Image (cartoon, grey):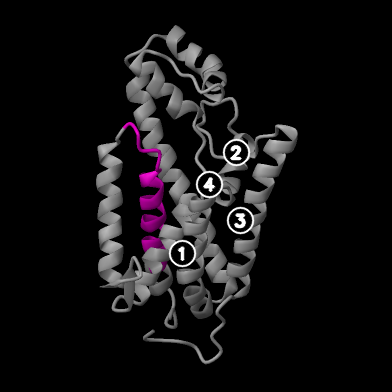
Amino acid sequence: MNFRPPSFNYLPDIVKNLLIINGLFFLATYVLDSSFGISLVKHLGLHQFQSPDFRPHQLITHMFMHGGVSHLLFNMFALWMFGNQLENIWGSKRFLTYYIITGLGAAALHLAVSQFQISIAEAQMSAQQINSVISDGYNALQNNQNFTDPLLRKLNLLYHTPTVGASGAVFGLLLAFGMLFPNTIIYLYFAIPVKAKYFVIFYGLAELYLGIQNNAGDNTAHFAHLGGMVFGYFLIKYWKKNSNNFY
């Protein structure tokens, strides 16, 4: 790397604790569901405001939930890869602040875009249809069913599909790494060398393109990823403006 403090810690405290917490949440999700029929995704995943399952704490808890082993491993590897550098430079307090704020920013943009999509769908539907989706849609999805009408089906997915994952905060870390270490080489697929600044730009544009495309079979929250990057960018700019020793 271009810069490494003399006492560089490959597993600093906040990164280590985040890895442990995410792992415990993932384990608890499967144990409680398989043994007791309790869905942590329902209670801790982030739901839309219209959903009867929405709770304010989900704005935080969704960041520690994951939808599968590959989802968890990818996010935790990226958290360690970029997070250990940033925590060593910033210190634990600033690193945790950045992580939480970018995670919240990711949730905010995701909810905003989803609410825009919901408003468009609702404008084409009657109040009776909307109430039907709100009241019956969740149970239908739990039984691997959905409405036959394409518009009702789309609205049901928007209402009742919870969002989980640390990806928004992780993309915030990626953005920070690219801003602090723009010329550091990252090996894409462990083989293709790319400078961090180009890697970040590529990922940002890809997420924007995929988010705008809004493909029906794509269950990735692309605007949440962008939200983490956008909030991270402005937070870093704010810190840099107000500190002579930012990094």
- The residue positioned 54% from the left and 15% from the top of the image is 136
SS state under label 2: helix
Magenta residues, dominant SS class:
helix
SS state under label 1: helix
Instruction: Residue 78: give its label.
Output: 1
Bin the neighbour count of mark 3 within 10 Å (Cα to Cα): few under 14, some 14-19, many 20 and up: many
Q: Do the residues labelled 1 and 2 touch (CB within 8 Å)?
A: no
- Between marks 4 and 1, how big is the CA–CA gap? 16 Å
- Which residues, given as a range, are shown in magenta? 216-236
- The residue positioned 39% from the left and 9% from the top of the image is 126
**In this rendering, is residue 170 above or below 11?**
above
- Between marks 4 and 2, how big is the CA–CA gap? 12 Å
Instruction: Residue 68: give its label.
Output: 4
| Nearer to us: label 3 or label 4 | 4
Expressed as whole percent of the image width and height from the top left, the position of residue 146 reads 46, 18
* Magenta span contains residue 180: no
Tag 4 or tag 3, which sits nearer the N-term? 3
**In this rendering, is residue 137 above or below 126?**
below
